[in-house]
Amino acid sequence: MAFDPVSLVFADPGTPSEIRAATILPALRENIELTTADGLTLVGELALPADGVVRATLITLHPLPTHGGFMDSHVYKKASYRLPALAGIAVLRFNTRGTSSPRGTSDGAFDEGRGERLDVAAAVQFAVDRGLPNRWLVGWSFGTELVLKYGALSPVAESVEGAVLLSPPLHRAEDSDLALWAAYGKPLTVLVPEFDDYLQPAAAGQRFAAVPQAHLVAVDGAKHLWVGEKYAARALNELVSTVLGTTVELPVQWQGSVAVLPV
């Protein structure tokens, strides 16, 4: 049975709680389904601020599903757990075609980033249809390839404010895709771990020099998968700062109700 976020049980401990990897803060959470132009149903979750006031919307694209990537990849899961409450940000997560998670399995099969163009468009259209404001694409690893290849193309390009990339490998994305983003002109923040397995800061600086508006952030000590609370928190701070347009340091404690799941 697919996990239903409505089943979460919240309790107020009465004292401030340290925000840990499995800490879930209050939000309006719902299981969602996206419908692609080729008729597939993709499963996902939308987490909204509990007060209904949305300052920005993250449309997340997960790492490579053939290597364990899915909508619950840990940085995205932590974003959905924390950002609605801490920053007033809506977080849309979903499984691309053929990908499984506790939420369920999306229709179709992995298509090496080709058919996934329709998955990106379906997610963005869902956010538009729901009236979610200040929409940003967020890609991690394989998800960055989808952002670079399709985020600057219609119909997605007209409906987002920009994008944030975590650990871009630049395997499937080509120089022509970077040129397209350069011409597109919308903001592109690129988070590159110092010890990334595929593209480290010096090489990333050379490649992304082709995109004048790209803002490259080299993250000392981090690796491709952003393992460790220190690095996940850094990624979330950079995400929030980008989409809200101001430097943000998210709180590390929460006063109020929390729910906790096993990590």
Image (cartoon, rainbow, N blue to C red):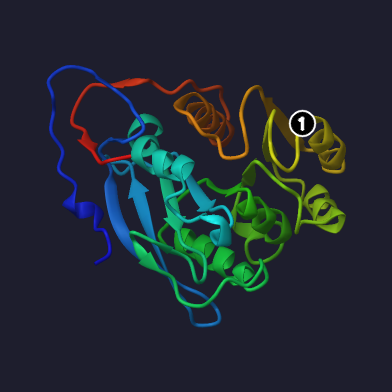
Q: Which residue is drawn at 38% across and 20% down?
A: 251
> Considering only vertical position in the picture, is 70 above or below 119?
above
> Considering only vertical position in the picture, is 53 above or below 4?
above
Q: Which residue is drawn at 42% across and 50% down?
A: 72
Q: Name the residue under label 1.
A: 201
> Considering only vertical position in the picture, is 211 above or below 35?
above
Nearer the observer, 187 or 36:
36
Nearer the observer, 151 or 236:
236
On the image, which quarter does residue 38 sit in?
A: bottom right
Task: Specify whether 183 is left or right of 231.
Answer: right
Q: In what element is the residue under mark 1?
A: helix
> Which quadrant of the rendered structure holds the C terminus?
top left
> Which quadrant of the rendered structure holds the N terminus?
bottom left
Q: Can residue 237 be seen in this view?
A: yes
On the image, which quarter does residue 79 sit in?
A: top left
Q: Can residue 151 be seen in this view?
A: no
Image position, residue 123 (x, y; %)? 50, 62
On the image, which quarter does residue 9 sit in?
A: top left
Task: Specify whether 161 is left or right of 209.
Answer: left
- Residue lying at the far bottom in this picture: please name it: 39
Image position, residue 21 (x, y; %)? 36, 32
Image position, residue 3 (x, y; %)? 26, 59
- Amino acid residing under circle 1: Pro
Q: Which residue is drawn at 36% across and 56% down?
A: 45
Image position, residue 128 (x, y; %)? 48, 60
Nearer the observer, 6 or 101:
101
Question: Total marks drawn?
Answer: 1
Task: Specify whether 81 is left or right of 108.
Answer: left
